[in-house]
Image: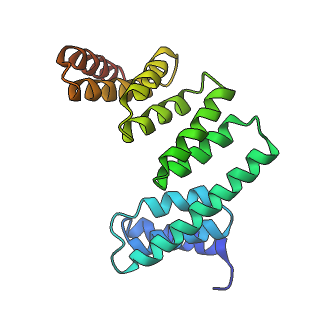
Amino acid sequence: NHEHYEEAEDYFLRALEREPLHASYRIALGRSLFDQGKIIEGIAFYESVVNAGQWDKLLDDNMKEAYQTAINRYQSLILREPDNALAYYSLGTIYSRTDRLEEAIEQYKRAVALNPQYKNALFNLASSYGMLGREDQAIEYYGRVIALQGEKYLNHFAYLHLGEIYERRGNQVKAQEYFKKAEQLRRVQ
């Protein structure tokens, strides 16, 4: 209430050391981070609340405000830096978190257009298509993820998702092939 946000952050961090799952402490810490301009860090604490109980409305209101602020900031960044693939990707993740999957897809596509090797953007693009039931596009982008070097954990999940898609389609042979590849990567990690 006295705008001592850094002090409040420290206080709530210490409180969470004693009671790590306390919802109101997590919400308050998220708010103190938000009030310091640490929007994404605040969102992370809001999203980590397992059961807000009596603070459910407060959490929901704070999350909506934080998400909208993040969207506004990424949109402003994109206006200043239209070739910033990370800004498009980040905006896409916020849209995805707020169930605005079509808008998320557009942002991921822009990130990939700027950087065709952007593995995280490709993975999120594939996942978004999958969540919308657009499995052909999901298969295409999961394939592109697997074809790129690095981030083997993303390959693991891409193989799992591909296995699930082919299992739903009734192609057990292909599904098992992908599940096996996913398991091999899991063992390596």
Q: Is residue 153 among what the camera can see?
A: no
Picture quadrant where residue 127 is located: top left
**Up/down of 139 relative to 84, above or below:** above
**Up/down of 81 relative to 178, above or below:** below
Picture quadrant where residue 30 is located: bottom right
Residue 173 horizontal side relative to residue 150, left or right: left
Please give the name of the residue rendered at 52% of the width and 20% of the height, measured from the top-left corner: 150
**Up/down of 17 relative to 166, above or below:** below
Specify the farthest residue to the right.
Answer: 80
Where residue 110 sits in the image (x, y, percent)?
64, 34
Please give the name of the residue rendered at 47% of the width and 77% of the height, measured from the top-left corner: 58
Where residue 165 sits in the image (x, y, percent)?
29, 28
Where residue 123 sits in the image (x, y, percent)?
48, 31
Q: Is residue 120 among what the camera can see?
A: yes
Picture quadrant where residue 3 is located: bottom right
Specify the farthest residue to the bottom.
Answer: 1
